[in-house]
Image (cartoon, rainbow, N blue to C red):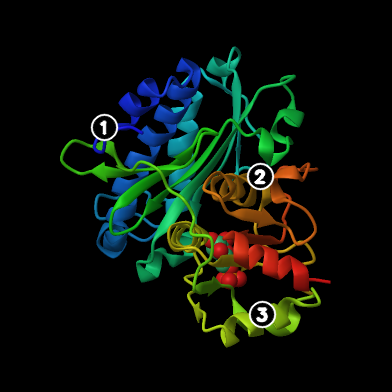
Amino acid sequence: MSTLGVNLSHFLLKNDVEPALISAIESISNACKIIASKVRVAGLADILGKAGKTNVQGEEVQKLDELANDILVEYLSESKVFYGLASEELDEPIFPEKGKEGEFVVSFDPLDGSSNIDVNVSIGTIFSIHRRVNGTVEDFLQEGYKQVAAGYVIYGPSTMLILSVGNGVVGFTLDPDTGMFLLSHPEIKMPEKGKIYSINEANAEKWDREGLREFIQTLKQEGYTLRYIGSMVADVHRTLIKGGIFAYPSDKKNKNGKLRLLYEAAPMAFLIEQAGGLATNGNENLLKVKPENIHQRTPVYLGSQKEIKQLLELLR
Ligand code: P6P
């Protein structure tokens, strides 16, 4: 296990991560440091100018999620290690000019939960890295278990990078003085069970999976408490650290659920399973699902072993 406080690059070198993947992760972390600086002053938008309007300097103020996307596209396109980029903000993937020899493709949600910015709630960037296979869009449509790396950056009271390269889960905290992500959580392991369930119960009447309401009722009888922030990165981060279950089920309106497979569910499932938890779409392990399209949605149930196994026994 690496010593607390080492920075991200040094940690990756010490753990013999391949140089191209180190460059890939560093380019994402550099972009996210810039995004963190923009998120931190988002509350000043009224002074600096609302999105879509001009600020006091007469500059166009971009929506923060569009700005986050532009920053990631700029940094990742220049990195030379990404053959292709897919984003929640882009209808189609892009293939950077400088990425023609790139070994990886990356899918990301540049600023998940951005609707929460106005109420100053933690939001985040989620990313998923796969190996390039044949240099086509198909490279993005690989099963989640084939990810070479996955992670998220949560912009909260502190800015944290949570990462797995397939050998457990580690956490880094951004040090404002040095501007470096420093190792703060050398080995994140999910508790076998938790005491928290995280689901938008306002949708309960619409849930279309038999047994789900019964499962939630059982957790209540067992004394669980409900925590639901409405920002996936924040809800999953709490679940990863404290255990329990996070769920966004399908319902009568959203037959495939709301969350996206490629750049929300699969990277989060990878992290949760690397930390000892489980992730399912209600029928099969989320990491085994073969995506059919870039923006495909999926039901998501992820968390500690006890709660996920208990759920699967009740779902019909
Ligand atoms: P609801 C945020 O808009 C988001 O995409 C995820 O971050 C979050 O988990 C979910 O939607 C919340 O959706 O329908 O409960 O407001």
Q: Quick one: quadrant of the N terminus?
A: top left
At label 3, the amino acid type is Asn
The extreme top residue here reads 101
C-alpha span from label 3 to label 2? 24 Å
At label 2, the amino acid type is Leu
Q: Residue at x 71, y 81 (%)?
A: 213
Q: Position of residue 20 (x, y in %)?
A: 49, 18
Q: Is residue 258 left or right of residue 282?
A: left
Instruction: Give the secondary structure at mark 3.
Output: helix
The one of 166 and 176 positioned closer to us in this rendering = 166
Determine whether label 3 and label 2 are within 8 Å by CB.
Answer: no
**Can you see residue 222?**
yes
At label 1, the amino acid type is Val
Determine whether label 1 and label 3 are within 8 Å by CB.
Answer: no
* Label 3 within 8 A of ligand 1 by Cβ: yes
Mark 1 sits on what residue? 6
Q: Position of residue 3 (x, y in %)?
A: 27, 34
Mark 1 or 3: the one toward you: 1
Q: Quadrant of residue 283?
A: bottom right
Q: Is residue 46 left or right of residue 91?
A: left
Q: Residue at x 38, y 41 (%)?
A: 32
Q: Residues within 10 Å of mark 3 (few under 14, many from 20)?
A: some
Marking on residue 203: 3
